[in-house]
């Protein structure tokens, strides 16, 4: 600006038509009002694409500092642990910000309260999906949520317009039809995954994209978390037990001699493993409820992951079907035949009666 002040202007792509902008603004204001998580202030916004700007926009505070991915390598071990400790605080605040439904956050038009509405997720809107009547929530339970996601994928793949998307072509039409049938079969198994433990059936606010590029720092102090456009209310068992930028293979310091790029890669993986374990140990030490929920939800995580892989990797349908067919021939260790439902590259198994 003329006075030297700086702001961030965000323009929305047309896929979501108001929902993304309205939800992002509501989420940022909720975070500012109800938590101590540093996030950009909202100064102005308009979700009407026919405004004078010609697009939906949000005018935001410019967070001071630099992105963590530009700073991380230059930090000392103590400084990195300091950053991770702050991320633990942020994760636990989100974990304990609970709601009664799964979806995205919106502000009630008649007052200053908030509500959970439809889920603003790119895989429910991008391409031809935005024109379809898909199940976008909000959902009242984990079972409804998982069924909604699987059925939305099935509905999209079964729609004539699906092949108009660049990610599909006519050579996989038969595989898509088979996949739709299998997804419908998978829906029948989902009620068995509905949590009976009340601690797992709780829903909390999640950022969903806490990569190092969305973490602003000055030195080792976090000055802000940015890019809340995909934030929403999800099952608490989906909470991350480590930051995504530390995700990777676990390695041990085995003393093996390495040189050049192999040594550099090994050291990077070793460091990620060390700080990932540090994050997990800190969050478990501070909050036993978080530990119980995240560690007790492995089967739920698998169920969701398997049900969504198809929409993320649509051209792997043939491979997915082959894996599913091969899984039918597997037997449990005690020799009993196991009923297998193969979704994507994962296995959800229930013993035969």
Image (spheres, rainbow, N blue to C red):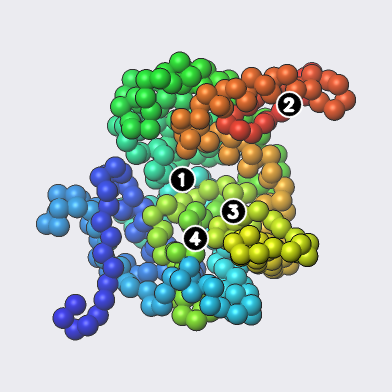
SS at badge 1: loop
Between 36 and 183, the residue placed more toward the observer is 183
Q: Residues within 10 Å of mark 1 (few under 14, many from 20)?
A: many
Marks 1 and 4, the one that precedes in the sequence? 1
Q: Residue at x 76, y 62 (%)?
A: 256
SS at badge 4: loop
Marks 1 and 3, the one that precedes in the sequence? 1
Marks 4 and 3, the one that precedes in the sequence? 4
Marks 1 and 4 sit apart, C-alpha to C-alpha, by 21 Å
Closer to viewer: mark 1 or mark 4:
4
For mark 3, what is the residue? Answer: 239
For mark 2, what is the residue? Answer: 350
Marks 1 and 2 sit apart, C-alpha to C-alpha, by 29 Å
For mark 4, what is the residue? Answer: 211
Q: Position of residue 71 (x, y in %)?
A: 49, 74
Is residue 207 found left or right of 246 in the rendered image?
Answer: left
Q: Residues within 10 Å of mark 4 (few under 14, many from 20)?
A: some
Marks 1 and 2, the one that precedes in the sequence? 1
SS at badge 2: strand
Is residue 73 found left or right of 259 in the rendered image?
Answer: left
For mark 1, what is the residue? Answer: 103
Q: Which residue ends up furthest to the bottom in the rendered image? A: 3
């Amino acid at each position: 600006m003329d006075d030297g002040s700086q702001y961030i202007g965000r323009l929305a792509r047309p896929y979501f038509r108001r929902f993304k902008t309205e939800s992002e603004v509501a989420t940022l204001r909720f975070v500012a009002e109800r938590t101590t998580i540093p996030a950009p202030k909202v100064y102005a916004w308009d979700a009407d694409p026919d405004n004078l700007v010609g697009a939906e926009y949000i005018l935001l505070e410019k967070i001071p500092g630099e992105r963590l991915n530009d700073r991380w390598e230059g930090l000392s071990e103590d400084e990195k642990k300091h950053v991770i400790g702050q991320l633990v605080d942020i994760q636990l605040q989100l974990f304990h910000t609970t709601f009664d439904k799964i979806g995205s956050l919106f502000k009630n038009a008649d007052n200053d309260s908030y509500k959970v509405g439809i889920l603003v997720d790119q895989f429910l809107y991008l391409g031809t999906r935005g024109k379809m009547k898909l199940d976008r929530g909000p959902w009242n339970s984990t079972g409804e949520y998982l069924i909604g996601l699987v059925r939305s994928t099935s509905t999209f793949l079964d729609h004539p317009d699906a092949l108009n998307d660049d990610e599909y072509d006519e050579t996989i039409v038969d595989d898509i039809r088979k996949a739709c049938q299998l997804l419908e079969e998978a829906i029948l198994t989902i009620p068995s995954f509905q949590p009976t433990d009340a601690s797992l059936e709780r829903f909390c606010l999640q950022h969903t994209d806490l990569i190092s590029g969305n973490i602003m720092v000055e030195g080792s102090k976090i000055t802000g978390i940015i890019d809340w456009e995909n934030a929403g209310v999800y099952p608490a068992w989906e909470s991350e037990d480590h930051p995504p930028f530390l995700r990777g293979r676990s390695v041990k310091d085995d003393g093996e001699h390495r040189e050049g790029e192999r040594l550099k890669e090994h050291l990077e993986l070793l460091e990620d493993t060390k700080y990932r374990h540090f994050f997990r140990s800190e969050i478990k030490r501070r909050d036993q409820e978080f530990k119980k929920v995240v560690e007790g939800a492995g089967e739920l995580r698998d169920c969701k992951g398997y049900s969504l892989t198809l929409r993320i990797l649509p051209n792997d349908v043939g491979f997915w079907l082959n894996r599913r067919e091969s899984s039918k021939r597997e037997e449990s260790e005690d020799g009993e035949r196991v009923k297998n439902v193969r979704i994507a590259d994962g296995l959800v198994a229930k013993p035969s009666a």
